Structure formats: structure tokens, C-alpha cells
Image: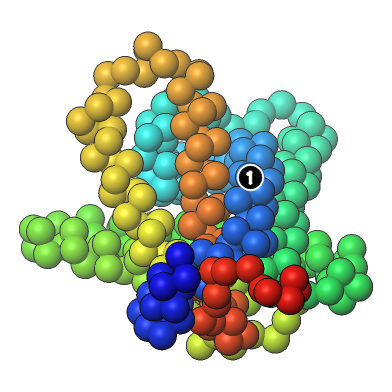
Amino acid sequence: MSRLDAYQLRHPWMGFPVAVGARFAADQAGYLAALIAYYAFFSFFPLLLVLVTVLGFSPTLREKAVGSVLEQFPVIGPQLGDNVHALHGSVVGMVFGIVTALWAGLAVANAAQNAMNTIWRVPTADRPSFGPRIARSALLLGVLGTTVLATLVVNGLAGSLDILGPATRFLALACTLAVNIGAFVLAFRALTNRRLGTRDVLPGAVLAGTCWQLLQLAGGLYVTHTVRGAGNAYGTFAIVIGLLGWFYLQAQVTLLAAELNAVRVMGEWPRSLLPDPAGE
């Protein structure tokens, strides 16, 4: 172990990933990711309900928007799409439902803020109070909404240029990847109560955006070869477990990307794997 530790301390190509992994474990980022996944699971359906209701005046636009959102969850997206309907009834009931849904959506953003401030070592006393915290959370929801609209534009352009064949699909993937990376850059900067520039968070945003894209592709292949036609067998149980697992996996990847940024910016590498002889 001592020889391995000495080797990784001398070689940055190994020392940097080791430092990121060690910091991820020291911050208990896995537990922070579980908290984000928990709130994301309970806020996802209300927010999807808001999207469907607000876009109810245009069935075509609503179908495209919901489809773009559910494409992010290839394992359970088709099952969700068949069971999402707009709010109907009294105006008071609809307004109350939308306000409640938005309030639930802020919970996941607040959990993400707590995780990012923990990763960036922001003291509790210096973290945002109630008002600024809610404003930052609302900004994150705005970023997510903008990402959905940008994905709609990309898909629309790809559909109109379908005559180009495989090149169109590659161009659409590249544009979607760029949108995802931009969204992570904004989220990483907005969710941390510390002055960070784009260059500070760009490497982690590239990692998070790329992993998000790869997870979508892997999920699509899994559906094609394994899960297709098994909806009746798994039913609601598959939706619940699949969605919760998807949120947890993506939350872990996102926090790992944030740890990468923090280690690089704060210069916390190389990092020894052995206990400090002084006990510190």
C-alpha cells in the first residue's frame, strides 16, 4: 500500500483521480446523492404535471416537450409518457396544484445547494438564507426549463434535416451534449455560494454532461435488448425502482463531477492514501 501510495503521489495521471475519489468518500457524497435522488423522485411528477398543464393549450407542443423530458429517462420514459395528463377542473384547484408542484420542485434544488456548498467547503454561517436560497433554487428550475426548450429546438432541427441521414443524428447528439454541458456549467455556478468562473466548473460540467449522454444511450440499448415488452410484467414497481435508481446514479455522477472541480480549483491533490502519522 505504501508503494502504491508513493507511485500515485508522483504521477498526476493517477494521483488526480485518486484524490477526487478520496474526497468523494470523505465528503460522504454518496449520502448527499441519495438525498438529492429522494427529493428528485418526489418532485419529478409534480413538475411534469406543471409542464403538461402549462402547455395544455398546444397538444403538439406539449407532446414534444414531455417527450424531450422523458427521453432523459430511457428505461422508464415510455411507461411514464402513457400515464401523464394535464390538470383540469377549477382555476383555484389548478393554481393550487401548480404552486404545490413548484414548491416540491424547489426541494431537490435546495438539496443540491446543500451538497454543492458541502463540496466547496462553504461554512454553514456563510450559506444563503431562506430568500437567496429559494432564488437560487428557482434559477436552477429555470435552467432545467431552458434545457428542455433547447432540446426541443435541437430535435426539431434534426427532424427537418433528416434527409442528411446518420450525419443528422450525430449533429443532434453533439448539439444535445453542448446543451447539457452548458446547463451543468450554469447549475454548478448557481448552486454554490462561492464565486466561481466558467473555467472553474467547465471540466466537471464536461464530465457530467458526457456521462448524462452516455447514460441515456446505455439506457436506450438496455430497453431495446432487454426491457422492451416487459412493461406488463414489471408495471408500477419497475417505474418506481427505475426512476429512483436513475436519479441516484445521475446524482452521484453530478457530485463526482463537482468534486473534480473542487479538487482542481482548491489544489487538493496529490492526496496520500495512508493515515497521517500525526493523527490529523
Place of residue 271 in the rendered image (x, y in percent of width and height, measured from the top left): 55, 77
Answer few, some or many: residues within 10 Å of disc 1's Cα (few below 14, many 20 plus, some between 14 and 19).
some
Residue sitting at 68 percent across and 74 percent down? 277
Residue under numbered circle 1 = 34
Residue sitting at 47 percent across and 32 percent down? 242
Residue pushed farthest top?
233
Q: Is residue 173 above or below residue 19?
A: above
Residue sitting at 70 percent across and 86 percent down? 195
Q: Nearer the viewer, residue 258 or 268?
A: 268
Tell me, yes or no, if residue 35 can be seen here.
yes
Place of residue 95 in the rendered image (x, y in percent of width and height, measured from the top left): 77, 40
Q: Would residue 230 appear left or right of 100 to someone viewing this image?
A: left
In which quadrant of the rendered view does residue 196 lie? Answer: bottom right
Amino acid at dot 1: Ala
Q: How is the image coloured?
A: rainbow
In which quadrant of the rendered view does residue 71 lie? Answer: top left
Q: Is residue 137 above or below residue 15?
A: above
**Element under disc 1:** helix
Place of residue 41 in the rendered image (x, y in percent of width and height, measured from the top left): 62, 38
Tell me, yes or no, if residue 180 can be seen here.
no
Q: Nearer the viewer, residue 223 or 24?
A: 24
Place of residue 209 in the rendered image (x, y in percent of width and height, measured from the top left): 42, 65
Q: Is residue 114 above or below residue 258?
A: above
Q: Would residue 79 appear left or right of 248 to someone viewing this image?
A: left
Residue sitting at 78 percent across and 40 percent down? 100
Q: Would residue 128 appear left or right of 211 to someone viewing this image?
A: right
For the N terminus, give its image quadrant. Answer: bottom left
For the C terminus, give its image quadrant. Answer: bottom right
Total count of labels: 1
